[in-house]
Image (tube, rainbow, N blue to C red):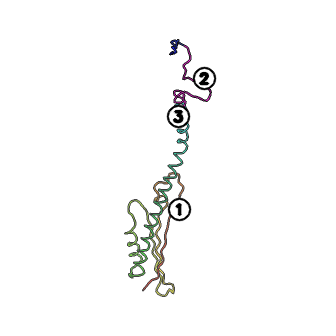
């Protein structure tokens, strides 16, 4: 014989709500509600964690980009100094020719490069020519927001034996 339940009146407990099932059994609806509540509470925590981590990650990313740009600038300066020293040592040019050869390879823009080429005298036993290229760090960087570089300069120097 089939058991007939009496209709539930208002205020009677629902069989799937908490406290109305045997211990250790959680109703389907209750677990969904708890999962949703847990997700909502974790969402606030993740926003706070993101607020702390995003500036740190962005500074690391921009620091890596800045370091890469500095290495690129140093490599360009080294290639220009090498070409200037080659002009002075091998091709028999003057220091002015060496400076022009170095400046031709350096990037343009508002960068203030200083190129200094020195040639030994005719009776000097040391026959080395030296070309030095320098630029202020503040101009070579993407942005010196905090004034960390001050008046420091990035410089490279190339020395070659003169063949004259």
Number of numbered discs visible in the structure rendering: 3
Q: Give me the C-alpha separation between circle 3 and circle 1.
A: 52 Å
Counting from the top left corner in percent of width and height, residue 50 is at 53, 42
Tag 3 or tag 2, which sits nearer the N-term?
Answer: 2
Q: Is residue 57 above or below residue 138?
A: above
Q: Residues within 10 Å of mark 1 (few under 14, many from 20)?
A: few
2 vs 3, front mark = 2
Magenta stretch encompasses residue 32:
yes
| Residue at the image position 49 percent from the left and 56 percent from the top | 64
| Residue at the image position 60 percent from the left and 23 percent from the top | 19
1 vs 2, front mark = 2
Q: Residue 41, located in which quarter of the rendered image?
A: top right
Tag 2 or tag 1, which sits nearer the N-term?
Answer: 2
Residue hosting label 2: 19
Residue hosting label 1: 152
Query: Bounds of the magenta span?
Result: 11-34
3 vs 1, front mark = 3
Q: Secondary structure at mark 3?
A: helix
Counting from the top left corner in percent of width and height, residue 39 is at 53, 34
Q: Is residue 17 above or below residue 4?
A: below
Tag 1 or tag 3, which sits nearer the N-term?
Answer: 3
Residue hosting label 3: 39
Q: Is 61 in front, or is 47?
A: 47
């Amino acid at each position: 014989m089939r058991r007939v339940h009496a209709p539930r009146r208002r205020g009677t407990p629902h069989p799937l709500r908490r406290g109305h099932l045997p211990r250790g059994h959680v109703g389907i609806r209750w677990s969904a509600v708890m999962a949703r509540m847990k997700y909502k509470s974790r969402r606030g925590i993740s926003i706070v964690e993101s607020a702390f981590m995003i500036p740190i990650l962005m500074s690391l990313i921009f620091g890596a980009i800045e370091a890469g740009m500095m290495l690129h600038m140093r490599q360009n300066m080294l290639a220009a100094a090498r070409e200037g020293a080659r002009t002075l040592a091998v091709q028999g040019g003057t220091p002015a020719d060496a400076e022009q050869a170095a400046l031709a390879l350096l990037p343009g823009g508002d960068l203030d490069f200083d190129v200094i080429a020195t040639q030994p005298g005719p009776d000097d036993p040391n026959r080395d020519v030296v070309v030095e290229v320098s630029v202020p760090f503040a101009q070579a960087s993407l942005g010196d927001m905090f004034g960390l570089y001050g008046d420091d300069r990035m410089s490279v120097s190339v020395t070659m034996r003169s063949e004259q």
